Amino acid sequence: MISSDVIRGYNDLIILSLLLDQASYGYDISRQIRTITEDRYIIKETTLYSSFNRLLNQGFIESFSGRSEQGRMRTYYRITEAGRSYYKEKCEEWTLTKDVINYFIKE
Amino acid sequence: MISSDVIRGYNDLIILSLLLDQASYGYDISRQIRTITEDRYIIKETTLYSSFNRLLNQGFIESFSGRSEQGRMRTYYRITEAGRSYYKEKCEEWTLTKDVINYFIKE
DNA sequence: TGTCATACTATGTCTGTCGTAGTATAATAA
DNA sequence: TTATTATACTACGACAGACATAGTATGACA
C-alpha cells in the first residue's frame, strides 16, 4: 500500500481515466482502482466523493441519476469534452513530473 | 514548469538525494535542483527551509555552521544514517507510486 | 551609495486527503 | 423475523505540505 498523500492531485486524473470509455459511479470506480492496482492503491470514500465534486465544479464531469440492476438509485458520472482535454494535460504534466523526480532517484 | 503540488511529499527525497555524497546548504541545494531539472522544477525558499526543518526534526539530516569562501556564515546540512535509510524507502515507494499512476495514463 | 546575490526567518493561507461519524437501501444469512 | 453485509452516499473538522508575502542581514561589486 502506498501513501495516498503521494498521489495528491492525481486522484482526479485517475477518476477521469476510468470515465474515458464509459460513465460510471462511485462504488464501481472505487472497485476498479483496487482491481487495476491489485490493491496497491485503495481510494478513501471521502477522497473519492470530494474528487467528484471538484471535477463537477470544474465542468470536467457531469452527473445523472440512474438505477442499478437491483433497482437501487445511484449517481452516475460522465466525462465532458473539457474533462478529456484536462485529462490529456494532466497526463503530459505527469510525464514531466515523473522525469523530474527520477533525476533524484538512485536505484 | 510543473505544478509543485504534484511533488508534494517528494521535496524531502529530492533534498536528501543531493546530500548523499556531500554536505550542502540551502542556496546550493536550490541551485542544484534548478540545474539538474533544467529549470523544470524550481523549489520555493519557504518550501526548502521547511523541508530542512522537517528532516532535522526527524533526524534524517544534521546541521552545522560553516563559512563560505567569502567568509559568510551559513548553515550546512549533512545526511545521517537514518536519512539514508529513509531515502531508500522513499525511492521504493516512488517506484510503486509511479507504477500505480501509470496504470491510468493513456499515452 | 546602491544594487545584486546570497542566506535566511516569521506568519498565515490554501487545498487535497483523511478520520470519524452517520444515513439509507437491497440482498442474503441465521 | 432479524441481523448482517455490500452498496451508496453526506457532513464536518483536522492535518500537513506547499506557498505567498514580508522582512532581515551581509559581502561583493559598480
Image (cartoon, coloured by chain):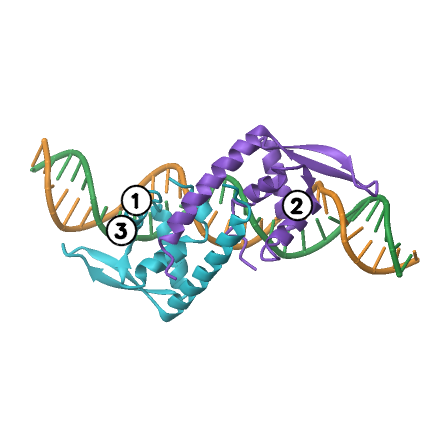
Chain colours: A cyan, B purple, C orange, D green
Q: Nearer the viewer, residue B16 or B75?
A: B16
Question: How dense is the environment of label 2, judged by Cα within 10 Å: few (below 14), some, or many (20 and up)?
Answer: some
Give the image location of residue D22, x and y in percent.
72, 53
How much space separates mark 3 and mark 2, taking CA atoms?
44 Å
Residue, disc 1: A38
User: What subunit carries mark 1?
Assistant: A
Kindly identify the residue that appears in the image at 43 percent across and 53 percent down: A10
Residue designated by label 2: B29
Q: Residue at x 62, y 57 (%)?
A: B39
Q: Which residue is mark 3?
A: A27
Q: Residue C16's x, y, as percent?
A: 45, 52
Q: Which amino acid lies under the numbered mark 2 shown in the image of this protein? A: Ile
**What is the chain letter for disc 3?**
A
Question: Residue B66: percent from the left, percent from the top?
Answer: 76, 35
Specify whether D17 is left or right of D25: left
* Position of residue D27 in the picture relative to residue D22 (left or right): right
Q: Same subunit under labels 2 and 1?
A: no
